Amino acid sequence: MNSPYEILRKPVVTEKSMARQQKGTYTFIVSMEATKTDVRRAVEKMYNVKVDLVRTLLVKGKLKRMKNMLMEGRRKDWKKAYVTLKEGYRLDII
């Protein structure tokens, strides 16, 4: 993983993630191969902030019905990262 733009795909914008932003924790969709250290370096480089804690988890894709309920498909699995910034730092994602 070289580029921070390959590691951080996009921020997650939901009601729950927006509530966490008030406490200094930001949520991102990251590459499946990214480690916690990779995510920390990418956020620090892209946004010029200091990261305190990174937590990652794998999200399993849901089963979906398609074509008039005749076929079943599956969404892709993806990786989510919760990034907590050090005191005094803030991101303006939206």
Image (cartoon, helix red, strand yellow):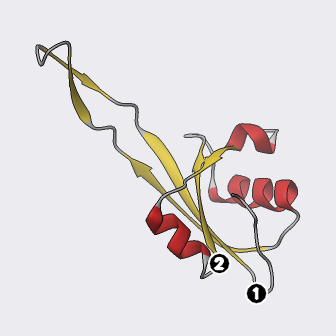
* Place of residue 86 in the rendered image (x, y in percent of width and height, measured from the top left): 75, 81
Secondary structure under the numbered disc 2 in the rendered image: loop
Residue identified by numbered label 2: 24
Residue at figure coordinates x 54%, y 55% from the top left: 13
Secondary structure under the numbered disc 1 in the rendered image: loop
Residue at figure coordinates x 40%, y 37% from the top left: 77
Rendered view: 41 above or below 31: below
Q: Which of marks 1 and 2 is nearer the N terminus?
A: 2
Q: Which circle marks residue 87 in the picture?
A: 1
Q: Which of 18 and 9 is in front in this view?
A: 18
* Place of residue 14 in the rendered image (x, y in percent of width and height, measured from the top left): 48, 58
- Horizontally, residue 69 falls left or right of residue 1, namely left
Rendered view: 18 above or below 36: below
Residue at figure coordinates x 79%, y 57% from the top left: 41
Extreme left residue here? 70
Residue at figure coordinates x 79%, y 45% from the top left: 4
For the residue marked with disc 2, what is the amino acid? Answer: Gly
- Neighbor class of circle 2 (other Cα within 10 Å; few <14, some 14-19, many 20+) is some
* Cβ atoms at labels 1 and 2 below 8 Å apart: yes
Q: Which corner quadrant of the image does residue 6 belong to? A: top right
Compute the Cα span from label 1 to label 2: 8 Å
* Place of residue 9 in the rendered image (x, y in percent of width and height, measured from the top left): 65, 41
- Horizontally, residue 43 falls left or right of residue 84, namely right
Tell how many labels: 2
* Place of residue 40 in the rendered image (x, y in percent of width and height, measured from the top left): 73, 61
